[in-house]
Image (cartoon, grey):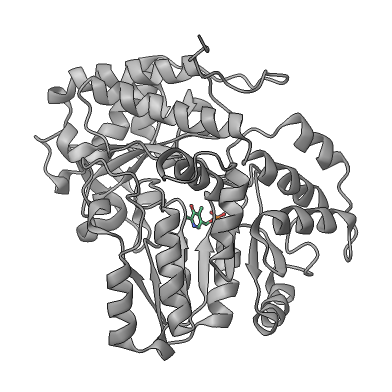
Amino acid sequence: MPVKTIIEPFRIKSVEPIRWTTRAQREQLLKAAHYNLFLLQADDVLIDLLTDSGTGAMSTHQWAAVMEGDESYAGSRSFDRFRSSVHDIVGYTHVIPTHQGRAAERILFGVACKKGDVVPNNTHFDTTRANVEFVGAEAVDLLIPEGRQPSLSYPFKGNMDVAGLEALIARVGREHVPLVMLTVTNNSGGGQPVSMENVRAVSAVCKRHNIPLYFDACRFAENAWFIKLREPGYENKTPKEIAQEMFRYGDGCTMSAKKDGMANIGGFLCTNNDILAQQEKDLLILTEGYPTYGGLAGRDLEAIAVGIQEALQEDYLRYRIASTAYLGNHISAGGVPIVQPPGGHAIYIDARAFLPHIPSDQFPGVALAAELYLEGGIRSVEIGTLMFAAAAQMDLVRLAMPRRVYTQSHVDYLVEVILEVYRKRESIKGMRLSYEAPFLRHFTAHLEPV
Ligand SMILES: *Cc1c(COP(=O)(O)O)cnc(C)c1O
């Protein structure tokens, strides 16, 4: 009988201590941080699930490649390795390095969009939306209705509403839609995947109207794994073959290498359009750096060149997606309401359903995140009324899993802490704001229990 237990596909060569605090200390620390977990010192956190961005562990192969970094200003060997590794997966003609994902977005929208344009996406990530709006264009989210129901289980909740896309193009006119974007996986929509069938359908609409299709490819490898697991016809394909097929339906991509690039910094912008690429490189030189480094060190390019291939390894993806699902399934079995099914990089707890006695204007997500810290030193992030104010449709607490960082016993610990907080849920109090900045208030807000 084959062994069923999925294990971490690595052993540990270098360890980084984590620091325990007592509950009494955490009460002090949280109060001093005004109940805003962004304002804590990372050293005062035991398990840090604030984000999966740039927080992953690099492999021995990546660290070895770092030593091979060629720091030449122009024409470095490291750029060649970076370019050919990325090109091998995405297949696009031009590979332009940037210091992270949002820089790729700023350059793409700065060159391709103008005031009055409309950019459709399944769901814009917040930096993507901000960069579209910065050039005066409108960012429109066209998620399928299934994607908006947290408790509904559906295999591809990240899909774009194809009829909605057709209708939007008809309404605003093709000349006002410079590009269409698909975010894989759909980060803001709960880390939910997009099916190949949906990619094909969106691509067909784009081709019919002669509109380029771009991927926000941050979690392209996790998306490929979900396609392999869930979409008929892909079970015998490798994640890399699936990713390569997906990219063939598009004309370019933006990428944060801090996600499925398995690096701590970096990103890139790709396109098949020679004229656009020239304008993008000109802008890159102005603000990021010469096109063979784009604001990164040669060693960063090396780490990405190796990491982006490692992200597609089957044993890694099997462990990655299973460990996220393990957390989600265990707390869900204990009664905790989560966005279903578990996404690729994070579990989202539905704080409104967890704390029905706290109205949304008393920030149930902030209250829950504070309690998870008090109970077990866990740092999560509220995605709800504090972040989006009146525009918040849900109050979620996101537990984002850094790549290759925590082991199963860490996850067992998380499950125990979350279930303990769930048992005590009726005693948790709401929060009130005592200070807010004029924009992006969640990063710096001060709160206190009501
Ligand atoms: C992280 C992220 C970005 C932005 O990338 P940064 O490296 O943080 O600038 C863009 N889109 C999605 C979907 C992301 O998850």
Q: Which residue lies most toward the left here?
A: 357
Find the residue positioned furthest to the top: 1
The percent position of residue 153, horizontal first and vertical second, equals 25, 40
Rendered location of residue 449, percent (x, y): 21, 35
Viewer-proximal residue among 362 and 15: 15
Residue placed most toward the observer, 48 or 398: 398
Pick the residue in front: 428 or 203. 203
The answer to whether one can see residue 375 in this image is no
Is 2 drawn above or below residue 436 in the view shown?
above
Q: Quadrant of the C terminus?
A: top left
Q: Position of residue 279 (x, y in %)?
A: 68, 82
What residue appears at the point 89 percent right and 59 percent down from the top-left corner? 76
Q: Quadrant of residue 426?
A: top left
Instruction: State left or right for residue 193 relative to residue 354.
Output: right
In the image, residue 112 sits, relative to residue 294, either above or below, namely below
- Image point (65%, 49%), residue name: 265
Q: Is residue 107 visible?
A: yes
Decide which of 283, 280 is in the foreground and name it: 280
Residue at 28 percent of width and 86 percent of height = 171
Q: Position of residue 376 (x, y in %)?
A: 37, 19
The quarter of the picture where residue 132 lies is bottom left
**Figure disc tally:** 0
The structure residue drawn at horizontal position 22% and vertical position 57%, both measured from the top left corner, is 145
